[in-house]
Structures are given as structure tokens and as C-alpha cells.
Amino acid sequence: MRILLPALILLAAPAAAQTAAAPATEAATPTNKDALKYRSGLPVPRFASLRAGRAYMRAGPGKEYPVTWVFVQPGTPLEVVSEWNVWRKVKDADGTEGWMDRAMLSTDRSIQITKQTRELRARPDLSAPIVLRAEPGVVMRVTMCADRWCRVEGQGRSGYLLREHGFGVYPNEPIG
């Protein structure tokens, strides 16, 4: 079971990311008539964010399936790749897939910093002053995206981030 711990927004040197991993098991996508019962009507795939402070990712669409991951950071972006009844098959920033109850997800948009410490700018321009740095794993709320840039905020701070520096928004997807 993997527990994702919140990362900190940095103004200086990055700290080490804190995660503990365990192997995940794969489950087949169900195909019976209940699959359409609680469809959201929203496009699939799409991004959502974690609503709860603690949410279980399961190997299949039901409480009888084993928990493969535990998410503990509200706002974590997840890509919804399939729907079945009240269950949503989701993928995280690492590419791990599993099933979550729809009640654990929100339509609020967020972005998770990926690969390395990233610089957030005062304006959507590479020559704009750096307002803060965020380490991999930091999750921030997305307030708008246009062109290559997204305006993001977290812990009372905001700035502009190149959309390719995070997981949670599609290329060229307008937000806000």
C-alpha cells in the first residue's frame, strides 16, 4: 500500500519526497449492465481531484477488492479513464491505475508538480520574476490555463506554471 504524503511549497532548496510504495494488482474492467447505471455524463478521460483527506484506490470497482494505494493529500489530481456504476478508474501522476468511489473525487482542478523542482513566475512569461519554487509532488489548485501557462495557487501563494511541468491538465485545455 502506498501512502502519498503532502509535499511542501519551497522558497529555497528542495526537500526529499516522502512516499512508501507497494505492488499494485490489476483488475479487468467490468462489462455488465450496471456499468452505465451511475455514469456522470462527463467526458472520459478527464481530470478530477481528490476530495477526501484519505481515499482508497482499489484493485477493482467494489469494496470487496483489495486496497492498493492510500491517498492522504486532498486536491491530488487524478485522471478518470473509465466509469462503472459509482466507481471511477483513475490514474495518478506516476501512471498507477485503480478504482475509487466517485464520492472521493471532485471536479475541482489541481496540478501536481512533476520530475524536478519547478519555478512559478509572476506573469505567464519565462522572463518574469520567480515568485516561488515547488518540489515534485506539490499539489496546487488551478485557477486558469491558457496557451502554455496555468495560474496556480497553494498555501496562500500563487504564480504561473508551464502546464507541461505538472500532472492534472491536458495540453491546450482551456480552464477558467
Image: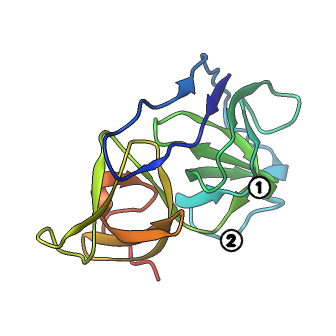
Extreme-bottom residue of the structure: 176
Q: Nearer the viewer, residue 118 or 93?
A: 118
Vertical comparison of 48 with 35: above or below: below
Q: Callout 2: 10 Å neighbours few (<14), some, many (20+)?
A: few
Q: Quadrant of the N terminus?
A: top right
Measured as percent of width and height from the top left, residue 143 is found at: 48, 76
> Which structural element holds mark 1?
helix
Q: Which residue is mark 2?
A: 41
Mark toward the start of the polypeptide (2 vs 1)? 2
Residue at the image position 58 percent from the left and 51 percent from the top: 76
Depth check, front residue: 145 or 32: 145
To which quarter of the image does residue 63 belong? top right
Farthest top residue? Answer: 23
Q: How far across and how far down the image is residue 164, in percent?
A: 29, 56
Q: CA distance from mark 2 to mark 1?
A: 13 Å
Q: Amino acid at mark 1?
A: Arg
Q: Nearer the viewer, residue 155 or 140?
A: 155
Q: Which residue is mark 1?
A: 102
Identified at 61% across, 45% down, the residue is: 90
User: Of residues 60 and 9, which is closer to you in this image?
Assistant: 9
Total numbered badges shown on the rendered structure: 2
Image position, residue 140 (x, y; %): 49, 60
Circle 1 packing at 10 Å, graded few (<14), some (14-19), many (20+), is: some
Foreground label between 2 and 1: 1
Residue 77, relative to residue 4: is it above or below?
A: below
Q: Which three-letter amino acid code belongs to the residue tagged 2?
A: Gly
| Picture residue at 53% right of the left edge, 33% below the top | 96
Percent x, y of residue 98:
65, 36
* Image: 171 above or below 33: below
Q: What secondary structure is found at the residue carrying circle 2?
A: loop
Q: Is residue 112 left or right of residue 162?
A: right
In the picture, the disc for residue 83 is none
